[in-house]
Image (cartoon, helix red, strand yellow):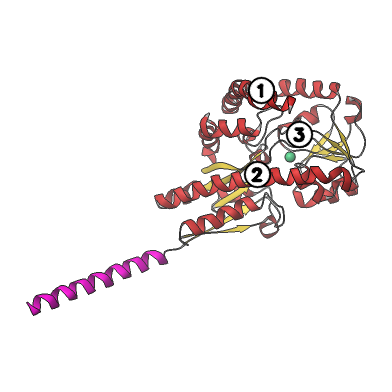
Amino acid sequence: MNNLLKKTTKTIIISAVLLGLGTQAHAKKVIKWRLATTWGPTLTPFIDAPRNMAKMVEEMSNGRLVIKVDASNKHKSPFGVLDMVKAGQYEMGHSASYYWKGKDINTLPFTAMPFGMTTPEQYSWFYHGGGLELMQKAYKIHKVYSFPGGNAGGQMGGWFRKEINSLADLKGLKMRIPGFSGEIMADLGLAVTNIASGELYTSLEKGTIDALEWVGPGMDINMGFHKVAPYYYTGWHEPAAELQFLVNQKKYNKLPKDLQQILKNAMKLSAYDMYIQNYHMNVEAWSGMKKDYPGIQIKSFPKDVLDAMKASNKKLLTEKTENAPLLKEVLDSQDAYKLKARKWTKISDYLYLKDN
Ligand code: CA
């Protein structure tokens, strides 16, 4: 009896030690990743999306997946994020899909399209209307997964040194405006360029550009654009601008299933947090703008300019999709979803807002 008790106790102790060792060995396996962003280290709220995501991942995984976020001052390549994730130099990226349109036209429509969907319409399309699947289809060639990374909402049309009273006033201006709207502006006679956030103010101040669009009042006023270009135009070009997380496929596929799920949830939640954080920043900035910055002139583009933008949008889309079947598939999907969703938006939001 005594012997049996001794034996059982010994077995329990050995099992506990083994179990303990097992747990310890498991806990010690820490996967370390790096993420490259297009944004500078203080660019709130864009930079907060990947940072919040990394914090959530570390906490939810109990420290098993640790992601270090490098801002653009660290890797010095704000528009090289896709290339770096593709090459495996970074496991992840955070940027805007339309920055790569020059390299791969199929990545263009996932950030924003002129006269396109609003933020709730776009999120519905991504998560329930086939958008997320089409985004993976477009990024497959780069061996990268792409996920929504936070929405900047409806953006302002940009800052201009002088008032735009007609189409003729736009001609010859040098403007920073990325994405497809940049191509429309080029079609209307502007010299168009894309410039990273850190160099925007200097470019405007030095006259390298005469006008620029950035985001909305919450982010724009901190940049000081109004000091040089006080005419602030309402938007047409980015009615919803979704940023993107990029993940190297090989690295993602190697993660255990639970870490993949944690990563996906953290990306989704941090994207939503960035959207509402940015909305709040716009609310605060807009409400104090008239008093704090009386020099800012709020304007909307005149009808002939908007008509020309719409006509150019239609013409350029037809040209662009002619030999680009995947781009056409994505744009057709967005158009069909917008058409369907807009009927509801007009009843639920527009009709209510009209009278309240
Ligand atoms: Ca923008």
What amino acid is at disc 1?
Lys
In the image: residue 219, left or right of residue 37: right
What residue sits 64% from the left and 22% below the top? 347
- How would you rate the neighbour count of disc 1 (Cα within 10 Å): few for under 14, some for 14-19, many for 20 or more? few
Stretch in magenta: 1-29
What element does badge 3 sit on? Answer: helix
What amino acid is at disc 2?
Ile
Residue under label 1? 346
C-alpha span from label 1 to label 3: 28 Å
Q: Quarter of the picture for ligand 1?
A: top right
Please report contact status of discs 1 and 3: CB closer than 8 Å, yes or no: no
What residue sits 53% from the left and 32% below the top? 134
C-alpha span from label 3 to label 2: 26 Å
What element does badge 1 sit on? Answer: helix
Residue 37 position in % (x across, y down): 64, 52
Image disc number at residue 276? 2
In the image: residue 263, left or right of residue 23: right
Residue 28 shown in magenta = yes
Image: 290 above or below 56: above
What amino acid is at disc 3?
Gly
Instruction: Please state which of residues 46 and 212 is positioned toward the viewer in this rendering.
Output: 46
Residue under label 3? 182
> Which picture quadrant has residue 171?
top right
What element does badge 2 sit on? Answer: helix
